[in-house]
Image (cartoon, grey):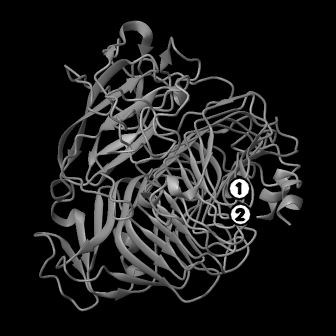
Amino acid sequence: MTKHLIGLTFVGLLALGVACGSDMSPSDSDDGIAGAGTGGAGSGGGSQSGSGGKANPPTPVEPAEVLPCFADEGTPAGDAIQLAVVVNRLKGVAPLSVFFDTEGTTAEATTRPYHDLAYCWDFGDEDAGAFATTGLSKNQGRGPTVGHVYEAPGTYTVTVSARDAEGRVVSSALEIEVEDPDEVFAGENTVCVSGAGDFDDCPAGAATVTTSSIREVQDYVAPGRRILLHRGEEYTGGLSINVQGPGTVGAYGPADEARPKVAASGTVFRISNAEPDFSDWRIMDMDLEGNGDGNTGGVAIGGKATDLLVLRMRAVGIAEPVKAPDSVLDYYNNNGSPGHDAVDGLTIVDSELTDIVGGDGRNATYAAAHRLLILGTIYRNSTEGEHLLRTPWIDRGWIASNTFAETPAPRLLIKMHGPPHSDSTSIGYQKYTERVVVSDNVFEGSGGHDLSVGLGPKNETSDERLRDIIIERNLFLPGPDVIAAIAISLATDVTIRENLLNRGSQEICITSGGQGVAPPAARIAVNHNTCYTEGERMLLARLSSAESVAFNNLAIGANVEELEIRGAESQGGNLLLSPDNIETAPPLDADDFALSADSAAIDAADETLWTPWDYHGRATPIDGDESGEALPDVGALEYVP
């Protein structure tokens, strides 16, 4: 059966389912991106900027010290790296979501700085804490595309360091100003809502409304307004929000009480519409519970919108917890309401989106977006729906520190495809899904799905293009029906590195290829991954794509006689070893994948490929033997004596 599935077209499977060296002046483009260095320029060939309002120029902070992210301080890059930092905004009210990108960065050592430079970020928010999903610090990001939510007012210094394979390092810094919501929403700009008439903890001077129907406070939705529901109480109804911010819908009351609960009988929060006027709102500290109806929704974006933060929202038993479809925007643009574009700045953080209902067409999140952030969120159980996360178009995104589990066959935990490249009536015409990092997530194989993460068009007749995607430092746990953990179809410039993959009884780790009308897959790099199987064969990478490489991957299998890597134009340092080379077999968490003290993978990597970190984000190489010389190890984890 497995051999037969390998022969299927891959699209068919998916269908089933410096010093910076600059003054840090902004790019003065119409899309309003503030940039550091040369960051405002697109990368050509369909790179798409967002649609937000203009931000102020970043304030340079000197000196910018090299962050302690790497094995050593390296050497100053000088002109060898021209680091650009692009930020969507520099000032706003807490909680403030800020998106950072390095578009425009150039380097002498590589023509692909997005993939081949190592970027480390300190967001300057030492009290941010850690993600409950992974335990990773919220104050640090790794990769060329990142973001952060600032929850406390203050001025924060953001620092980024970039390093190339030659050890040359450049750092830069800028400031983010976060305003106090109690000052911005002072007096009657805050509205407290309680069905019980309990306003004891309401901010002083706020307006008060006694009702359990949030629909009755619709008239209070206005620019510069904060609407707070009482903790521990239950509400009905919903709100339409189509005004300029800043604005917030949140909670008040004793912190030890449960978040306000809204019973969803339709869509609870409708954002924007055919005549859009939406920007800069937060929906936070809210529990939404469905009634099993397939027409319920949590947050639905129905028109052009800028900067929407969904923070600590629990949605259970709802058909569509977060929805930002491109189809409705195309309809408006082609039927008398032009000017719509995908939401610019959609952030989902520390939320729980579970138990999807409604059947076909229902996803925990369906979103076309510029600057998409999904961080620290639990996605679980869409067995009564479709995919957990489906993205028809992402123009810059960071999907990190989330948990994904339980989707039905043939759906996926993440299904990422591109916009309709050749459809001139679409907002995605001649554009790509691009500049997306998927990192530090946990993907569980339960639920019956065929593929865990899939990149590619929805079918063989769709010209949907993807490029510049990085999948790194993720943990893939087994499932009996998961054919492949990572599946790539018709995407170019994809890097897959430092992932841990337990395939259980299945035998394919990573595969690419397929047939369709989009350009074929190309330049797939599979490096420093560790893959485990209990099966009798190991197809670690099937790379049916030009200019693809596979280096320093570790395969673990007691019953496997030969490691298969197909289609790599160049490869080296790949090893097949027995389970006694890792701490625990089968490996059910990251610690189980750790190399044993006498593992043949220690110090055995091909040094022609440089990698800055292992799965845990530890600087590499780490000295693993008694020689005193640190050499890189094979696989996703460095051995720590």
Q: How far, Cα to Cα, is label 2 from label 1?
A: 7 Å
Q: Which mark is residue 560?
A: 1
Identify the residue under disc 2: 535
Residue displayed at 74% across by 48% down: 562
Say whether residue 458 is visible. yes
Say whether residue 212 is visible. no
Residue displayed at 40% across by 73% down: 218
Residue displayed at 49% across by 25% down: 29
Question: Picture coordinates of residue 416 (x, y %)?
Answer: 66, 52
Q: Are marks 2 and 1 in contact (CB under 8 Å)?
A: yes
> If you read the primary sequence from the N terminus, does the residue marked by circle 2 or circle 1 appear first?
2
Question: Picture coordinates of residue 572 (x, y %)?
Answer: 64, 30
Q: Quadrant of residue 119?
A: top left
* Image vertical order of residue 590 relative to residue 101, above or below: below
Q: Work out whether residue 242 or residue 61 is closer to the camera in this orientation and state it.
A: 61
Q: Work out whether residue 213 or residue 86 is closer to the camera in this orientation and state it.
A: 86
In the displayed orientation, state which residue is furthest to the top.
79
Question: Picture coordinates of residue 115 (x, y %)?
Answer: 55, 30
Amino acid type, mark 2: Gly
- Under circle 1, the secondary element is loop
Position of residue 163 in the picture relative to residue 4 (left or right): left
- Tell me the crowding category of disc 1: few under 14, some 14 to 19, or many 20 or more residues within 10 angstroms, Cα based: some
